[in-house]
Image (tube, helix red, strand yellow):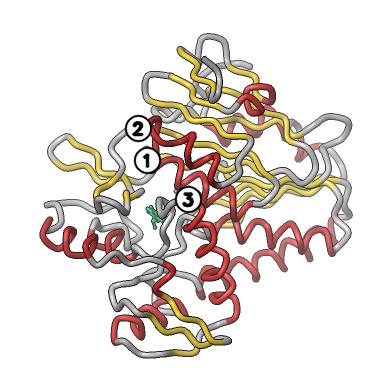
Amino acid sequence: MTSLRIPLLLLLLLLGLTGCEKTPGIHKETLYVFGTLVEISLYDVAPEKAAAVVGELNQTFRKMHEDWHAWKPGALTELNSAIARGETVETLPSIIALIERSRELSQLSGGLFNPAIGHLVGLWGFHQDDLPKGSLPDFDRIKERVAANPTMDDLILDGTQVASRNPLVKLDFGAFAKGVALDEAVRILKSRGITNAIVNAGGDLNVIGRPGDRAWKVGIRHPVDWGVIASVDLADGEVLYTSGNYERFREHEGIRYAHIIDPRTGMPVTHIVSASVLHRDGGLADAAATALSVAGPPGWEKVAEAMGLDHVLLVDDNGTVYATPAMIKRVTFEPGEAKRMVVSGQP
Ligand code: ADP
Ligand code: MG
């Protein structure tokens, strides 16, 4: 490794994708979707086939982006408006699938991952492309929204019809949709005969096969400075998702307010942490990484156990690493980066 502090994308280039462009049979393209760059790298594939399948992924991602957007007018905002009016409404099958899956995950996470808290996310100013500025939201309104206790269990589904027992439910799949989207991308790639590929959405990624004769080597972020604290080799079908409160935040009078909200308090998560989950299911890993970020060092083990996660790693701003034994076996730390290690279940 040349430096301990190289940005993640660059690191991924160095570690996993060295010399891609020059090597025949490797096709790399970057799409901008879900507010992030999605880098698709396909190995051992003819250029025409690669271009066609990337085009298909692009269309799939754009449709999801439009249909599932939390604040730009589309199918999800229509559903949210109907919920607020107390009406029953017909929605898209893809949104029904998101609701059903995220309801289960929300329950498993003890409500720390809760896509029904869109009003809180909006009140904190994160329902806009630019980072929010200026004064903080009205705390009485925050309290009101927390007291209303919006949960995924408030929703009543009947086929593609949705109603809510609670008009203060507002769906925001920002913590989960990227994982579902990358799972779908992998399904499409495989169905088109792609056997070796990586789909990387700003450090959240799914892999298929392997690049040549080695494994996919990817970096795990340090929560403070975008450096890398460790690397991990991923096998065919594995995914790695990292969530952190250092990415999108608003700053007011020297205090950072993160885009990850604790549903119990309505307040942005204050402990600085990055939470990574290695799994085989992108949707689950994405939701779980968010729940673990909310839980932070005091509650992460409980969430990991409840969600059935074997491979979890958290890093706080002091460089303390909290991890499961299985995850410790998989990662290689940068020298000197892990200042203290707290391994679950070990004294
Ligand atoms: P990223 O997408 O940046 O990797 P996350 O996956 O953690 O980060 O998603 C954060 C987004 O999820 C927020 O921008 C917001 O839309 C939504 N969100 C915030 N807090 C929660 C929460 N506790 N449960 C579910 N969704 C949340
Ligand atoms: Mg997430």
Residue at left 46%, top 12%? Answer: 339
Q: Is residue 200 left or right of residue 288?
A: right
Q: Residues within 10 Å of mark 3 (few under 14, many from 20)?
A: many
Amino acid at the residue labelled 1: Asn
Q: Nearer the viewer, residue 139 or 159?
A: 159
Local secondary structure at mark 1: loop
Q: Residues within 10 Å of mark 1 (few under 14, many from 20)?
A: many
Asked if marks 2 and 1 touch (Cβ < 8 Å), the reply is yes
Residue 245 badge: 1
Residue 109 badge: 3
Vertical relation: 302 (above or below) 15? below
Local secondary structure at mark 2: loop
Q: Is residue 193 left or right of residue 127?
A: right
Vertical relation: 94 (above or below) 110? below
- Sequence-earlier tag: 3 or 1: 3
| Image-quadrant location for residue 326 | top right
Asked if marks 3 and 1 touch (Cβ < 8 Å), the reply is no
Q: Residues within 10 Å of mark 2 (few under 14, many from 20)?
A: some
Amino acid at the residue labelled 2: Ile
- Across and down, in percent, residue 158 comes to 54, 86
Q: Nearer the viewer, residue 38 or 283?
A: 283
- Pointer 2: what residue? 272
